[in-house]
Image (spheres, helix red, strand yellow):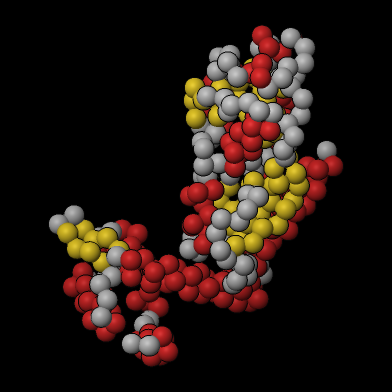
């Protein structure tokens, strides 16, 4: 079947309900559960999937006693089904906003860099200005959040922007450059030793973000720039609360984005170790899909993120 014939056939046969069913089965890995969520009988859901497979001569799901798993063909179809449904969401929210005042829902992914100051302050502003907009926040690392953004599960990702875009179809807006601090508990033995070098810190007990994070890569590169090996982590964690408690109750040290450190410094809990500023700073901003645009609700959040970023830069 040629691409043109397949396209015509899909336009004629496929319904939005079919796309939603494929996505739900892919998420649940179980046709019975997916049918329940869509208020369908399982035989009807099974027939729809088999009819699609038969029409296009493709196997979309591998069946077993434990459920179903999408095949490569199924993954491709589900990926694009998510994007189609995401665009339907955009249309419905824009029409609703035109009818009765701006409303809608935004799903935003956040990285550690944005989770304590930038995003919460923007959400406070959004809530005050647009109380009819609801928001879901998903915290994670780039390797988890960016694929979800590409698939349409997220409207945007806020936090550190990678130096090289690893995923096609995404674009980023830089809001500001943020330095990384080397930090420890207030009163840490190293805090009164005068100026320290990175080499002085190699034997310390480190809390480091996971290797998949750009913060970790930037920190490692700072050590490599000085001809030093990367520090060995005692704990790998991207949890702000976990790292805060570990730092307060031990003599561990950590690399921390400036805005997060500043919050705990003002509370008298953490101090910056006297290490010269790290040469590499990380761009913080918003990553979105290149095509498809933002819903009006998401566009409002982007504007509030810009305003908060400007305030943070000034302060």
The quarter in which the C terminus is drawn is: top right
Measuring from the top left, give residue 34's x and y in whole percent: 29, 64
Q: Is residue 110 above or below residue 239?
A: below
Residue at horizontal 51 percent and vertical 52 percent from the top: 145
Given residues 26 and 137, the one toward you in this image is 26
Residue at horizontal 64 percent and vertical 32 percent from the top: 224
Measuring from the top left, give residue 51's x and y in whole percent: 24, 81
Residue at horizontal 55 percent and vertical 29 percent from the top: 208
Residue found at the very far left of the displayed protein? 65
Q: Is residue 51 visible?
A: no
Q: Is residue 103 above or below residue 281?
A: below
Q: In this rendering, would 45 be left or right of 189?
A: left
Q: Is residue 259 above or below residue 292?
A: above
Quarter of image, res 195: top right
Q: In this rendering, would 90 be left or right of 55?
A: right
Residue at horizontal 22 percent and vertical 64 percent from the top: 62
């Amino acid at each position: 079947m040629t691409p043109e014939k397949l396209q015509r056939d899909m336009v004629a046969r496929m319904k939005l309900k079919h796309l939603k069913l494929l996505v739900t089965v892919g998420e649940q890995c179980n046709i019975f559960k997916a049918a329940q969520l869509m208020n369908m009988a399982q035989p009807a859901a099974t027939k729809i999937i088999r009819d699609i497979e038969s029409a296009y001569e493709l196997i979309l799901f591998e069946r077993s006693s434990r459920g179903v798993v999408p095949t490569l063909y199924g993954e491709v179809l589900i990926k694009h089904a998510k994007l189609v449904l995401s665009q339907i969401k955009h249309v419905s929210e824009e029409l609703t906003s035109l009818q009765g005042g701006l409303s809608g829902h935004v799903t935003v992914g956040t990285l550690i860099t944005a989770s304590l100051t930038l995003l919460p302050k923007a959400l406070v502003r959004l809530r005050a200005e647009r109380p009819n907009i609801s928001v879901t926040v998903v915290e994670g690392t780039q390797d988890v959040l960016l694929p979800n953004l590409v698939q349409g599960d997220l409207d945007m990702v806020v936090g550190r922007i990678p130096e090289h875009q690893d995923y096609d179809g995404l674009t980023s807006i830089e809001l500001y450059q943020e330095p990384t601090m080397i930090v420890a508990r207030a009163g840490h033995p190293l805090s009164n030793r005068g100026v320290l070098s990175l080499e002085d810190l190699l034997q310390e007990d480190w809390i480091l973000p996971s290797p998949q994070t750009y913060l970790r890569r930037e920190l490692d590169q700072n050590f490599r720039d000085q001809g030093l090996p990367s520090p060995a982590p005692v704990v790998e964690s991207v949890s702000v609360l976990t790292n805060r408690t570990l730092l307060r109750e031990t003599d561990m040290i950590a690399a921390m984005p400036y805005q997060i450190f500043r919050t705990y410094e003002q509370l008298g809990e953490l101090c910056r170790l006297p290490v010269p500023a790290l040469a590499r700073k990380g761009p913080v901003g918003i990553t979105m899909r290149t095509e498809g645009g933002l819903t009006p609700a998401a566009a409002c959040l982007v504007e509030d993120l810009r305003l908060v970023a400007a305030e943070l830069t000034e302060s």
